[in-house]
Image (cartoon, rainbow, N blue to C red):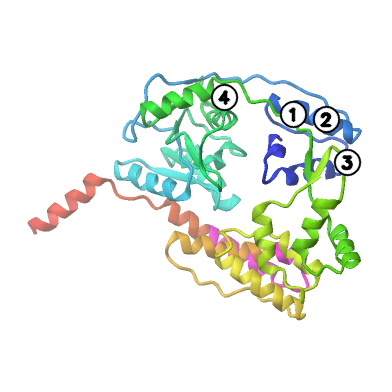
Amino acid sequence: VQMMADPQRGWAWVDALVSAHTPKLMMTGPALIEPSLRTLCELCEDQLQVQRTKRLSPVEVSKRSTTLERLEPCSLLVAFSRKLVLELKGMLESVGKSVSVVYGALSPEVRREQARRFREGEADIMVATDAVGMGLNLPAHTLCFYTDEKFDGIQNRQLKVQEVKQIGGRAGRFGHHDSGEITALDPQTLKSIRRLFNSPDAPVDLSQFQVRPSIDHLSAISELMGEPSLLRAWLTFNRNINYGEAFISVLPDELAEWIELIDDPKIPLWLRWTFACTPIRGGFDSPASQHAQRWIKRVAEGHAIPMPKLLLGSDLASLESTLHVVETYLHLSRSLPEHFPEHDDGEDARKLLNDAITRELSRQRKPRAARRGGRKAGRRR
């Protein structure tokens, strides 16, 4: 629940919290978010009950760094990019270790399968990005940081205290291990991780909660001001509409960039809004983005969109980008079923691609010694 303070995605979490149609909502998070939650609950005239829990298995930062070769089974190695995760997977396999991986571009189905392989001992080591810090409970004894820095979409920066605690907390899952250990691959990184892990949390006390306008708000602005652009209508709303001191309307940079690509006045405003609310994975130069930009024009002309033909490449990147196209189609089939009618075919395609990605990720590189032996034998023959 601390994600409601995130500068890019906070609005989505606030929306989820205040829009939940339920008499009881259970939230988990660190104590640092409690003041903000109390403020939000008072604004919504809800009651907040806090139940504090204690960690059942202790976790400590190791006194010594380690190496890839010395990583033991039930270890979790955390890096901060897909490219690095796959490189580390190959390096570990070359010294005879079996590996599963988790990173943000993978679908939930593939992540769960990779977690199962690690949980059931089919993989000795899991290599993951910080995507592993939320939503996956893994029986890892050791959590090893590859680095203490990450690229946050704007710049390379040092990890924050809460990030180190959230990720490091994956070590020593209760019921599997009596304790957990946090380490790193070099002494300097380990020193930094130790300092961050043992530092107090930075306080979070939101004075304003991020929200976004609805399509009704934006349509009203567009009509009253004669403003054809969805992007400019949104920015006008942000500048001029006062929700009161407690809330602020936002337009994240990434979303603004996507809206710019589809903000054609010839396309109905509601349709541009629907596509703006559609997650586009893989970046704005990706096949998913290119398909979506073509689809919105076809829908505006009244056409139904068939499921695109799948080109199943053998490499992982092609499989992932094709899956992103299918996931975009499926999302739109739920929002615009009359224009994206082949939902069942999309689900079949998603399963096919998830299975292919799982097979590719589960393929183990032969250990270095075995490859050298094979070459020597070839020369002798």
- Number of the label disc, if any, that sits on residue 205: 1
**N-term-proximal mark, 3 vs 1:** 1
**N-term-proximal mark, 3 vs 4:** 4
**N-term-proximal mark, 1 vs 2:** 2
- The span picked out in magenta is 331-354
Check contact, mark 3 vs mark 4: CB within 8 A: no
Residue placed under numbered mark 4 in the picture? 174
Residue placed under numbered mark 3 in the picture? 244
Rendered residue at 85%/32% (across/down): 41
Question: Which label sits in the foreground, 2 or 4?
Answer: 2
Q: Residues within 10 Å of mark 4 (few under 14, many from 20)?
A: some
**N-term-proximal mark, 3 vs 2:** 2
Rendered residue at 83%/30% (across/down): 39
Q: Amino acid at mark 1?
A: Asp
Q: Give the image location of residue 47, x and y in percent.
A: 88, 28
Residue placed under numbered mark 2 in the picture? 39
Question: Which label sits in the foreground, 4 or 1?
Answer: 1
**N-term-proximal mark, 4 vs 1:** 4
